[in-house]
Amino acid sequence: IAARRGKDITLEVGDNIQVQDEDEVISYISKIDGQLVWEGNRISVEPVLTIQGDVGPKTGNINFNGVVAVQGSIADGFNVLAGKDITVNGNVGSSVVQAGGCIVVKNGIIGKNRGLVYAKGNVTVKFAENSEIRAGGNIDIKRAALNCSLIAGGRVISLTEKGQIIGGVLKAGEGVEAKILGNESEHKMEVHVGSDFVVEVKLRALRKELAKYQSVLKKMFFLIEKVKKVYTDLDKLPEKILATYNEARKRATALKIAIKNLKEKEQQYLAKFSDVHDSEVVVRESLYKGVRIYFGTAVYEPEDTKSKIRISYNSDTQKVHVDLL
């Protein structure tokens, strides 16, 4: 069946689009990374990607260079990566959510001891359970956190609603401020403050990479030695064996240089991480027994429940001070 001729239309150009007209071919080119928005005959590109419902099987994983706004929730096992900010109106499950800016979760993060929520800026969430949250800036818990790993380059804050953090591990470079730390059941938890814990994360990743390189280097050395044992005269190696032998030597040389550079970087990270600076833990209501507070190697652990208390560390005297608010 022959198709009917379509109607000519005129497109109106909106924001962030440029038009090129060459040899009667009109091209519409986006000036930015973003989401194509079509309204009537008008097209534009917005720097915000809006997911109208949940991130899940219908959408797949999201990887966007700008701002991502999720109107629903992020289902277990699905990832959202954004070059800038991420806002989630619902919950975040056991997912990887990573932002080059800040992350705001208007409801909760229920990590089920899997997944990761990481922002180079701040992370703000209503509540969190069994989750790993990292922020280059502050972590702000609006209601409560239970059995979480919270790592902040700035502060961990929980001062609104219940304002309670129970269990898990808190690491904050500048300090912690909460209404309640721990609970009446003397739930064990660790609070570490005063060090650059973002560097600590990088140090762990570096050591993992270093171990991998060392393992590959060991295999290269084994291959080189094996060739030497089998072929006493290396000048008469078969062509394929010679190519393998030379490639192994080349890789071994490159790996040794890479390992040397990683070890130098490791020492830089260690020096930076071992520096404990002035910091504090402020508890506005109750600090329960079972909470251990570390300033580097210095430790404070309450013998019983304390109310309205400030625990601070002076880097000059290297001593912990306890004061009532």
Image (tube, rainbow, N blue to C red):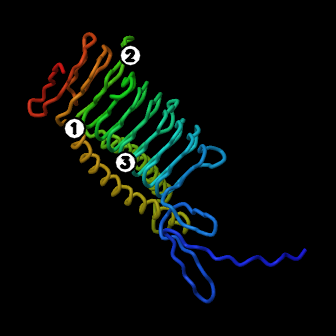
Which residue is identified by label 3?
120
**Residue visible at 43% across and 47% down in the picture:** 212
Secondary structure beneath disc 2? Answer: loop
Per the image, the residue denoted by label 1 is: 274
Name the residue at the bottom extreme: 23
State the residue position of label 2: 187
| Residue 199 horizontal side relative to residue 107, left or right | left
User: What is the x, y in percent for residue 247?
Assistant: 47, 63
Question: Of tags 2 and 1, which is closer to the observer?
Answer: 2
Q: Is residue 132 left or right of residue 1?
A: left
Q: Distance between the Cα atoms at labels 3 and 2?
A: 30 Å
Q: Nearer the viewer, residue 263 or 160?
A: 160
Q: Is residue 34 above or below residue 194?
A: below
39, above or below 196, in the image:
below
| Circle 3 crowding by C-alpha within 10 Å: few under 14, some 14–19, many from 20 | many
Q: Residue at x 45, y 54 (%)?
A: 220
x, y (%) of residue 91?
Answer: 53, 36
Q: Position of residue 256 (x, y in %)?
A: 35, 55
**Front one among 140 and 9:** 9
Q: Which label lies toward us, 1 or 3? A: 3
| Mark 2 / mark 1, whichever is N-terminal | 2
Residue type at the position of mark 1: Ser
* Location of residue 41 in the rendering, given as x and y in whole percent from the top left corner: 63, 69
* Quadrant of the rendering where the C terminus is positioned: top left
Q: In the visual, does 297 lie left or right of 219?
A: left
Q: Amino acid at mark 3?
A: Lys
Q: Are marks 2 and 1 in contact (CB under 8 Å)?
A: no
